[in-house]
């Protein structure tokens, strides 16, 4: 039973947390970087790294006026990455 609890806590819980969304935080990040007309399309746990806590797929207009699809990957502590397709 202890092995099962350890398995759940080590593998399952981080996977669940990785799929979490933080749209408010992601929106603030994208606006600061010059994105406009931001639309979120849900979480993207497989597009971010294993150490990222939040993921958000988005469609927006970048600062050059180009329509982009991408994902914002965030870690606790305010670290983030923006990946465009």
Image (cartoon, rainbow, N blue to C red):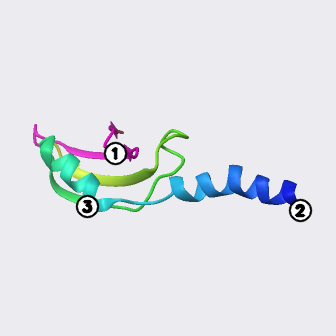
Could you say which is closer to the camera, residue 57 or residue 6? Answer: 6
- Residue 50, position in %: x, y? 55, 40
- Residue 17, position in %: x, y? 53, 57
Nearer the camera: disc 2 or disc 1: 2
Label 3: which secondary element: helix
Give the farthest residue toward the front.
2
When asked about the image quadrant of residue 58, the answer is bottom left
Q: Earlier in the sequence, mark 2 or mark 1?
A: 2
- The span shown in magenta is 63-83
Could you say which is closer to the camera, residue 69 or residue 44? Answer: 44
Judging by the rendered image, the residue that carries numbered circle 1 is 70
Residue sitting at 35 percent across and 43 percent down? 77
Q: Is residue 19 magenta?
A: no
Q: Is residue 81 magenta?
A: yes
Label 2: which secondary element: loop
Q: Earlier in the sequence, mark 3 or mark 2?
A: 2
Q: For the residue carrying disc 3, how many other residues have a C-alpha within 10 Å: few (<14), some (14-19), or many (20+)?
A: few
Q: For the residue carrying disc 2, how many other residues have a C-alpha within 10 Å: few (<14), some (14-19), or many (20+)?
A: few
- Distance from the alpha carbon under mark 2 to that under mark 1: 41 Å
Nearer the camera: disc 3 or disc 1: 3
Quadrant location of the N terminus? bottom right
Judging by the rendered image, the residue that carries numbered circle 3 is 24
- Distance from the alpha carbon under mark 3 to that under mark 2: 39 Å
Nearer the camera: disc 3 or disc 2: 2
- Residue 37, position in %: x, y? 15, 57
Tell me how many marks there are: 3
């Amino acid at each position: 039973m202890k092995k099962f609890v350890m398995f759940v806590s080590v593998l399952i819980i981080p996977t669940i947390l990785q799929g979490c969304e933080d749209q408010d935080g992601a929106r603030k990040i994208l606006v600061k970087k010059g994105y406009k007309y931001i639309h979120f399309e849900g979480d993207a746990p497989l597009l971010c790294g294993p150490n990222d806590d939040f993921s958000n797929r988005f469609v927006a207009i970048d600062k050059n006026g180009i329509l982009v699809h991408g994902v914002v990957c965030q870690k606790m502590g305010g670290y983030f990455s923006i990946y465009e397709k």
